[in-house]
Image (spheres, grey):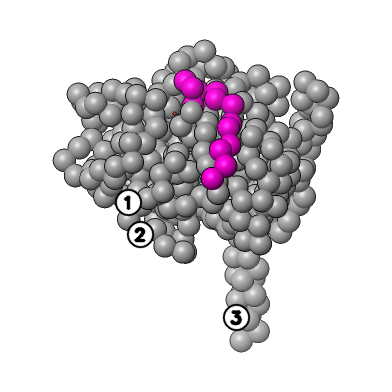
Amino acid sequence: MKLRQSILVAMLLTTSTAAVAAVTKSPWGKTAEGIPVYLYTLSSADLTVRITTYGARIVSIDAPGRDGKKADVVLGYPDAAQYESDASTYFGAIVGRYGNRIAKGAFRIDGKTYQIPPNNNGNALHGGPAGFSTKVWTAKEIPHGVEMTLVSPDGDMGFPGELTLHVRYTVESGSLHIVYSATTTQPTVINVTNHAYFNLAGDGKGTILPTLLMIDADHYTPVDAGLIPTGELAPVAGTPFDFRKPTAIGARIDTPNEQLKIAGGYDHNFVLNNAGPGLHLAAKAVDPASGRSLTVTTTEPGVQFYSGNFLDGTKTGKFGGKYAIHAGFCLETQHFPDSPNHPKFPSTLLKPGETLHSETVFTFGVEP
Ligand code: GAL
């Protein structure tokens, strides 16, 4: 009896130790202005995740494959300086105050027009030229992870109201949880997401074209030539945008399709089927060779599936080589692009007295 009890206690201890993540902090260089940057390492038995205070970015995620061997499954750089000198990829970053595009950078709240400096073909992308991805966030250790905080002043990149944003990254077993909360001093718009690029075969291990992808969406939002939604929610049925059954990303990416042509591949917001107040399935990706899988659940109504179309072989990654087109894919859980100019889309307005709550979970596993 005693032996059984002690075995049980030992089993419980092992299970809880496996689930608990250890957190360490180390200096990680300085920005060009001399602001110190830190790197937090969150490790459970299954996952090791590194997060930097520069842009609150995910720098690496080590996850095991079918053979038990871990590989780093996100794209990125070896140091803060290289993140700072790259204004186009947003590797691993928290993007905001408004992730994705706002047409011409302009929108109205209560009859007043606000203007964000355009930084992408005349439109505002990921919060404008000095968005949240370019800021050094303050950080504090929390159980299983780290909480990053950014105070975006009133008028920051043209957005109204002082916005206080907390992003909590925690690791439990094979899951990375990202929890966002935000408050504002004036009505504003907010759409924050994480911009990690995944390659489940491993960073630098070829393209993501063989990756099998499932997206739980019957509709997506087609775009115009500037990648701004037309406002239509188009059915995916009968198009290369139908990922309701797992399909290789590369299977239809080159088929003649106006939307694929505009974006040079996939770069579209999918309207999630089960959007509601709690966590719901967004997508699942599997690398058939290594067996590594990634399941994405979220409280957000949409997910931007981006197939790394603008990667052009000029950026050298932490693996030591160049990132070619389709070296990684993003699944950016979010409200729809340009929502402030589309009253029929779910609202991105945040008012004083309200607290924005958003949550996304990346769960890594192995397929037999
Ligand atoms: C994505 C966006 C793409 C591209 C990319 C960054 O979120 O949808 O069009 O801008 O970020 O290179």
Q: Position of residue 270 (x, y in %)?
A: 35, 44
- The Cα–Cα distance between marks 3 and 2, rounded to whole angstroms, is 45 Å
Q: Residue at x 79, y 26 (%)?
A: 30
Which residue position holds label 1? 216
Mark nearer the viewer, 1 or 2: 2
- For marks 1 and 3 on the same chain, the one whose residue lies earlier in the sequence: 3
SS type, badge 2? loop
User: Relative to the observer, which residue lies in front, 172 or 152?
Assistant: 152
Q: Position of residue 175 (x, y in %)?
A: 53, 53
Which residue position holds label 3? 4
**Stretch in magenta:** 111-123
- The Cα–Cα distance between marks 1 and 3, rounded to whole angstroms, is 45 Å
Q: Is residue 244 left or right of 5 when viewed as pictured?
A: left
Which residue position holds label 2? 274
Q: Say whether residue 218 is magenta.
A: no
Quadrant where the N terminus is found in the figure: bottom right
Tally the numbered discs: 3
Mark seen at residue 111: none
Q: Is residue 180 left or right of 242 when viewed as pictured?
A: right
SS type, badge 3? helix
Q: Residue at x 48, y 57 (%)?
A: 299
- For marks 3 and 2 on the same chain, the one whose residue lies earlier in the sequence: 3
Mark nearer the viewer, 3 or 2: 2
Mark 1 touches mark 2? (CB < 8 Å): yes
Q: Residue furthest top?
A: 314
- Can residue 332 be seen by looking at this rendering? yes
Q: Residue at x 45, y 15 (%)?
A: 312
Q: Is residue 360 left or right of 237 when viewed as pictured?
A: right
